[in-house]
Image (cartoon, grey):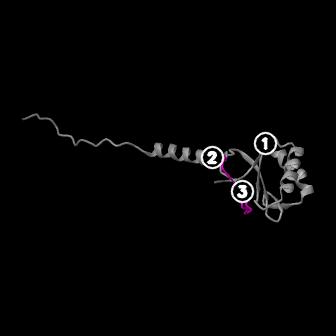
């Protein structure tokens, strides 16, 4: 009787990728939820051009002033006299929000100044004017 070694079929080593896929999907969901999206005012204005443009990172409130001097806050038309009250209401949710004014290049500068005065009166700390880079 001959004793020999049994030949075992060698199994291939496999890596279970299920847990890695779970982690990748969880990370994807996390980054989607925590990323900040750039918001626009939703109103088409022809912004003036400037050679020195600085990017505004965390703009919480957008005010658009059209060429007809209509004022839009959150895509709603607001009368000049109601700008301060509207901004005060928006600042209740985000007290440290900055304001970006997107004024059309043909809008009256007086309207822009009135909006800036109303923003200061409402307690906005940071005000920026939007412009196109030359």
Estimate the x, y position of residue 47 in percent, counting from the top left.
Answer: 72, 58
- Residue position for label 3: 48
Q: CA distance from mark 3 to mark 2?
A: 29 Å
Can residue 47 be found in the magenta stretch?
yes
- Residue position for label 1: 126
The mark lying in front, picked from 3 and 1, is 3
Going from N to C along the chain, the mark reached first, 1 or 2, is 2
The mark lying in front, picked from 1 and 2, is 1
Going from N to C along the chain, the mark reached first, 3 or 1, is 3
- Residue at image coords 88%, 54%: 83
Q: Secondary structure at mark 2?
A: loop
Instruction: Relative to 37, say whether 15 is above or below.
Output: above
Q: Quadrant of the N terminus?
A: top left
Neighbours of disc 1 within 10 Å: few (<14), some (14-19), many (20+) = few
- SS assignment for the magenta stretch, majority: loop
Out of 73 and 112, give the one closest to the viewer. Answer: 112
**Side of 46 where 33 appears, left or right:** left
Going from N to C along the chain, the mark reached first, 3 or 2, is 2
Out of 67 and 49, give the one closest to the viewer. Answer: 49
- Residue at image coords 14%, 35%: 5
Estimate the x, y position of residue 120 in percent, counting from the top left.
Answer: 87, 44
Estimate the x, y position of residue 130 in percent, counting from the top left.
Answer: 72, 52
Out of 26 and 92, give the one closest to the viewer. Answer: 92
Residues drawn in magenta = 42-52
Q: CA distance from mark 3 to mark 1?
A: 20 Å
Residue 86 can be seen, yes or no = no
- Residue position for label 2: 35
Q: CA distance from mark 1 to mark 2?
A: 22 Å
Image quadrant in which you'd find residue 3 = top left
The mark lying in front, picked from 3 and 2, is 3
Specify the farthest residue to the bottom: 68
């Amino acid at each position: 009787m001959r004793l020999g070694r049994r030949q075992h079929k060698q199994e291939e080593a496999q890596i279970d990728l299920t847990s890695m896929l779970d982690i990748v999907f969880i990370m994807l969901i996390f980054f989607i939820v925590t990323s900040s999206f750039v918001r626009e005012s939703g109103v088409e204005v022809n912004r003036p051009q400037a050679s020195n443009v600085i990017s505004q990172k965390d703009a919480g409130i957008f005010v658009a002033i059209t060429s007809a001097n209509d004022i839009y806050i959150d895509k709603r038309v607001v009368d000049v006299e109601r700008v301060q009250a509207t901004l005060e209401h928006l600042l209740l949710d985000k007290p440290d929000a900055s304001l970006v004014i997107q004024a059309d290049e043909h809008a009256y500068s007086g309207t822009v100044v009135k909006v800036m005065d109303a923003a200061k009166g409402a307690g906005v700390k940071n005000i920026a004017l939007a412009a196109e880079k030359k």
